[in-house]
Image (tube, helix red, strand yellow):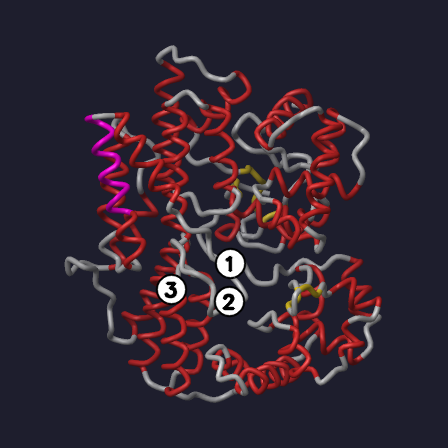
Amino acid sequence: MIGGARIAPSVVGRLNRYAAGDPHVFRAAANLLTGRQLRGETSLPDPLPAITDRARAVVTSLTAAERRVLLCASVTTDDRVRTLLAATGVDIRVLLSPRLAELVRIHGGRFTRISEPIRAALMATASRAEVREVHRSIARALHAGRDPRRYWHVAGSVTGSDDRLARQLVHLARNRYEAGACETAVRIAAQGVAVSASAECAADAARIAGLASFWAGFPEDAEHWFRRCEERGHPVVTGNGGSALEIVAFVRTSPQAQADPKESARRFIGTICELDPPARDESALRHLARIIETYEQDRAVSDEMFAAFLLSMPPLVSAWPWDPLTPPSYTPLVAAQICTLQAAFHAQAGAFPVAAEAVLRAGNRLPLLPVSWGIIGSIVGAIATSGGVLDPLFAQLFKDLALVPTPAWEIEGEAAGQVTVDATRIHSVGAHAVDHRSVDDVIHDASEGLTRRERQVLSLAIAGLRNEGISAELNISARTVEVHLGNVYRKLKVKSRAELAAVFVRSSRTRA
């Protein structure tokens, strides 16, 4: 073991949701990721490669019909039950059997995606021929309704090159990119590169993959795709005629904190706006820049502008699978900047618990790049050092954010770039604001009365998921989530998610 590595907060959130509170599963999944993936510089594999013993046992015991249903549910872009039935050819009674009903939840003609450990076990045991056949069946089912998603599945079922198919995928990827679903756009565009027959078509697909990767918050991936474009003689240029690679380099090397964080934000916004953002995102960034300028002149007016802006902010688009009817949203990178400034505004107003909750919620779901944390650290650090009154539960959190290079969860690294995560040492730099060593260990200090399900719900709530997200992750109803959260609040004697974070702070400090 030499050197060190860090886990980005958003990666910790993804791993924690995958593990559902089990530290052994968390560690197993992290061990299979590269250092760059853990630092949030590049996207994570889907599904995550870790396979639990339970998932392996479930997959091994499946019948042929059950396996086909689950494999189809694992790769399909459509969550409608009728598509699943048409693609698999099974009777509805198979889906409603006790075994599958536990793994594939059906509600309102749609099904929830099966758990990631089950998907990982299925994909690990499926042959390429088996996966291609499943894609072919889904494509046929979607073709009947002329659904454009069929092109994705057609691409997954062929082995040769086809520029016409590649152009359809580029069109789909661009559509998803403009709608804010960047990770979906990257996957579609990457498939377009794979099936392209000409260098020009491959460069078009790589360009969309690079743009979507950038606005998804993965600069390493963006650089990879932009270089692919250059290799094919089609370099990506910015709105002012510069190089896209220069903007990627700027984002990756932006200083963490500057004397004037508002100037840092203005410079960051002005620079990234040159890299062909969706029109909705460019408008939002320009509006944020105006809010920052107004703040220097009239704080009250700036606060009103920002409040009105937040009220009009659409919900984030789910990464995968995609729904053509999903309303457009901001890209993850723009949403992260909005959440960053929201936290900074709360902090300036002295609402530190609310600011802390915003930081933790955003950090566990969005790619908060270095400049974002630098803005928060600079603003709140200045308040802390100038004698401003900070909520004691979150004072150390914000002080640490101002001092460390980047908020992250420290781990030990190996020379080969792979990482070994010691579950007893994983911790956040923010005064252990969210302790990911083990939910059970941390909560044990606060209460021994939580059930296993309550611990899972609590873990996901701390990771930043709202009730709907917890419901989807655990395959339980939203009402059941409310019941479990109510029990958690009652047992831990808290009334909100912010107070739950405070429990973690106190519990972690006790154990530190």
- Which residue lies at the image location 40% right of the left edge and 74% below the top edge? 172
> In whole angstroms, how far apart are the C-alphas of marks 3 and 2?
11 Å
Disc ID at residue 55: none
- What residue is disc 3 on? 177
Of helix, strand and loop, which one carries label 2? loop
What span is in magenta? 285-297
Residue at image coords 47%, 49%? 40
Task: Read off the residue under disc 1.
Answer: 318
Spatial CA span between label 1 and label 3: 12 Å
Q: Quick one: 510 or 232, which is closer to the camera?
A: 510
Quarter in which the N terminus is drawn: top right
> Is 2 colored magenta in this rendering?
no
Q: Quadrant of the C terminus?
A: top right
Q: Amino acid at mark 3?
A: Tyr
Residue type, mark 1 in image: Ser
Name the chief secondary structure element in magenta: helix
- Type of the residue with mark 2: Trp
Question: Is residue 15 or residue 42 the one in the foreground?
Answer: 15
Q: Position of residue 485 (x, y in %)?
A: 69, 38
- The residue carrying mark 2 is 322
Q: Quadrant of residue 65?
A: bottom right
Q: State if disc 3 and disc 1 touch (CB < 8 Å).
A: no
State the SS at label 3.
helix
Q: To which quarter of the image does residue 437 belong?
A: top right
Given residues 487 and 359, the one toward you in this image is 487
Taking the spot 15% from the left edge, 57% from the top edge, the residue there is 240
C-alpha gap between disc 2 and disc 1: 7 Å
Q: Residues within 10 Å of mark 2 (few under 14, many from 20)?
A: some
Residue 296 on the magenta segment? yes
**Farthest residue toward the left?**
240
Q: Residues within 10 Å of mark 3 (few under 14, many from 20)?
A: many
Q: Are marks 2 and 1 in contact (CB under 8 Å)?
A: yes
